[in-house]
Image: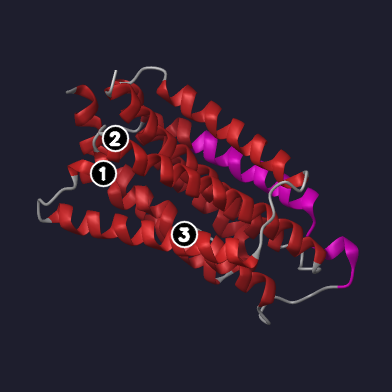
Amino acid sequence: MRGRRILDLTSDKGELPMATAQLVRPNPVLQRGLESRDIPRTTTESEQMSIVGSVHATGVLLFVLVVSAAIGWRVESGAIVIGSAIVALVLGIYTNFKPMQAQYTGLAYAVFEGIFVGAVSKTFEASYPGIVFQAAGLTIAILGALLALYRSGKIRVTENFKLGVSAAVGGVFLFYMVTFALGLFGVHMPLVNSSSGFGIAFSVFVVALASATLVVDFDYIEQGAARGLPRQMNWYAAFGLMVSLVWLYLELLRLLAKLQDRR
């Protein structure tokens, strides 16, 4: 029953932190960043958002997140882990509404979310040795493959695609929140969180959805640079990409755990 125990732990006690990635998904509001009158335009190239600038900002945020995850791996207090997830949730929401401040709030988010991710990773690794390396490797592989397909033009981000992804993300987030609320009253959903065929299919769907948000992030970076958004938006784009990667990584952990339970 090793696998069932770890899946129950993440669903009953960790669903709200896991849902943090859903709530602060920037994709539904990234378009607001492109169209909003609150975001000033600039005609000076050195002051504009760029693809290279966004890549550099993403690298910084991911570095901070990985270092924080190493700290979270050593944290034994559940209160600290849950507290970090809640702080990350608040920072994520704030960043979505104040994108021009993402350079600071995004860094803070990376710190607190990293602590949570490290603690969750340690929990999975304890029951499934080697699973963290597999999930991290798959996350990097999916990122590279999607980026290559996007750059080659084989994946096109249309308005319908964006709307579909946003609607699906909202649906999954709502489902996670309902699951969390029911869990407070001792009502759980073992079918979705189990290693049954349905449970695995659900995880595959969520992994595919998290992967789709990466493509939307790529498009946002390209569109933002083309429209002359200020360079501070490099950090907002990096924040969005980081959140997508964290969500994808966490969902891959859950999927791999379910697959191992079926052996």
Q: Amino acid at mark 3?
A: Val
Distance CA(mark 2)–CA(mark 1): 9 Å
In the displayed structure image, the side of residue 69 where residue 56 appears, left or right = right
Q: Are marks 1 and 3 in contact (CB under 8 Å)?
A: no
Residues rendered magenta in the picture:
43-68
Q: Amino acid at mark 2?
A: Gly
Quarter of the image where the C terminus is located: top left
Dot 1: what SS?
helix
In the image, residue 54 lies in the stretch drawn in magenta: yes
Q: Amino acid at mark 1?
A: Val
In the rendered image, the vertical position of residue 140 relative to residue 159, given as above or below: above
Q: Are marks 2 and 1 in contact (CB under 8 Å)?
A: no
Pinpoint residue 13: horizontal percent, then vertical percent.
22, 44
Which one is closest to the eye, mark 2 or mark 3? 2
Counting residues from the start of the chain, the first of labels 2 and 1 encountered is: 1
Residue at the spot of label 1: 192
Pinpoint residue 20: horizontal percent, then vertical percent.
39, 54
